[in-house]
Amino acid sequence: MQWWKETSIYQIYPRSFYDANGDGIGDLPGIIEKLDYIKDLGFETIWLSPHYASPQRDFGYDISDYFSVAPEYGDTEDALQLIDEIHSRDMKILFDMILNHTSDQHPWFQESRSSKDNPKRDWYIWRKGNGPGKPPNNWACLPGGSGWKYDNTTDEWFFHNFLDFQPDLNFRNPEVKKAMFDTMRYWLDRGVDGFRLDIFHSIYKDDQFRDNPFSWKYVPTSDFDEGYFQKLEYNINRPESFALAKEVRQVIDEYSPDRFVIGEVFGKDVVKKYLGENQDGLNLILQFDLIELQGADGNKAQEIRNILQRYESEYSPPFLPTYSVGNHDRRRYISRIENNQGLARLLALLQYTARGVPITYYGDEIGIPDGDLPHIGAKDATAHKYWWLPPALARSLHLYVNRDGCRTPMQWDSSPNAGFSKTSSARPWLPVHPDFEICNVEKANKDPYSLLNIHRNLLHLRKAHDSLRSENLQILEGLPESVVGYSRKSESEDTNIYMNLGPEPVKFHHASGKILFRTDPACTADGAIELPAWSGIVLQ
Ligand code: NOJ
């Protein structure tokens, strides 16, 4: 099997992971110092959120030079050393690649905006307005508001699918496509094992610039294809973007050993197209169903069963789903599930034992809660747009507009600043979550059933049992209502997973077997299977 089909991914937000030089900002040498932690947990691949030169208005998702490293994170030598150190631990590294847009400070955009006849003019999407002060059409950008920004240098508007300092590149211009493919090749040549592709579904826009149709929805749907009173029909998920997925795959496939790309794409019923009918598009796409999971009430067993069933039918082999509960854009999952530690353990059990690639965002392995940080004065630029929206109202609408909350520093120990900065007097770029004295790596290491040890043990279990990495998953029937069960088979073994996703204990008869793993020491399988509330077991 190709290595990326069996891998497990740990996402690092470089600014927040470990600050080795004491300036309050995480850095590449800091990541290098902590690689053994990630290796020991059992992760095989690291996805590094952007570390390139950037004005940091969107913390690296606004790149001003794809070939250099942001000085506060280190330099090119550090990036190359990071790649080497990861490989020397027999691990892989994915860089984040932003093809859709650059920073407005990128020299390409500076040239492009300077005059209508500049050779780079057509590298971005420029249009005349629809009358004085009126944008060329009604397209909303993904964070809300018009996607067009007026530029008085040339009296035209440029388009941005994200924030207005992130102008979209024009992929219809072959020079742009070539420049961006060469950017990927530059890092592939230096050993990176692939990329996570930022808002890949946004890259092509309608070539006729048709208005988006009206919709009654203001708050965006979870698929992000409707909202702000329109259906985002013409500025995302265009057929040319599905075709681009195949071209990107060809670039990746120029390299051996295998490299891979995983796309950030949103949209109802269409995202699978990015994988290509013959699995000749992006290798994987990020899936957000567990990231959308809210609360710890309701029928959680049914919600999880539905996700499993859908992934198994839509992404049956050779396709492969991905499982993650959090990322750098969404409220921390432990807070979303109301700090239900049992459910948190079960989500880890699901992630690492279901058929798919698990992706864990730094800090979720110890359950760092979401930072309760105000919109006003936020570091995150989307919060600046929504400064007027009270955080409690935003939460009740499931709108997460201040992403500072999920980016607070990693909590290593209970020393000042949670051990995030090597120098204890440093002032971290975001406040450390106040619970760091009870929630940190050092403390979690000591408890055999801590969330951290659950992650570690499951990752090692997954490595040791080929059934857990096989292409086979069968959902088990005839179990109590609150229990989700599935079997994983390989040539040499048969493994059953049972999770009690409810607040009452359950006792039932099903296959018996040796206990390989349990999320709670009180789970037993002695004749009958007995699972306390919110607990699960793996039987061989
Ligand atoms: C999606 C990324 O995950 C997010 O952090 C970023 O702000 C936008 N794309 C724009 O690049």
Image (cartoon, grey):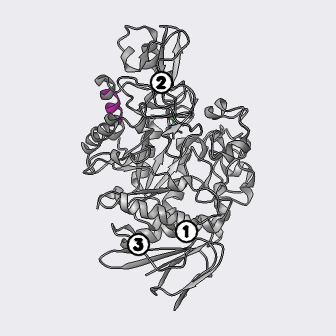
Residue 482 on image: x %, y %: 57, 74
Vertical side of 8 occupied by 327: above or below: above
Of 19 and 291, the residue lying toward us: 291
Give amino acid for label 1: Ala
Query: Going by the picture, which residue comes out furthest to the bottom?
Result: 527
Magenta residues (range): 178-184
Which numbered circle lies on residue 518? none
Is label 3 or label 2 in front?
A: 2
Q: Is disc 1's CB within 8 Å of ligand 1? A: no
Secondary structure state at the residue bearing disc 1: helix
Q: Is residue 412 visible?
A: no
Q: Residues within 10 Å of mark 1 (few under 14, many from 20)?
A: some
Residue receiving disc 3:
464
Q: Nearer the viewer, residue 428 or 338?
A: 338
| Dominant SS type (magenta) | helix
Kindly identify the residue that appears in the image at 74 percent across and 50 percent down: 416
Q: Return the residue at label 1.
A: 301
Q: Residues within 10 Å of mark 3 (few under 14, many from 20)?
A: few
Mark 2 Cα-neighbour bin, 10 Å: few <14, some 14–19, many ≥20: many
> Does residue 372 appear left or right of residue 111 in this picture?
right
Between residue 484 and residue 373, name the one nearer to us. Answer: 484
x and y percent of residue 98 in the render?
Answer: 43, 35
85 above or below 308? above
In x, y percent, where is residue 119?
Answer: 35, 12
Q: Element type at marker 2? A: loop
Residue beneath disc 2: 167
Q: Is residue 369 magenta?
A: no
Q: Three-letter amino acid code at disc 2? A: Pro
Q: Residue at x 74, y 42 (%)?
A: 425
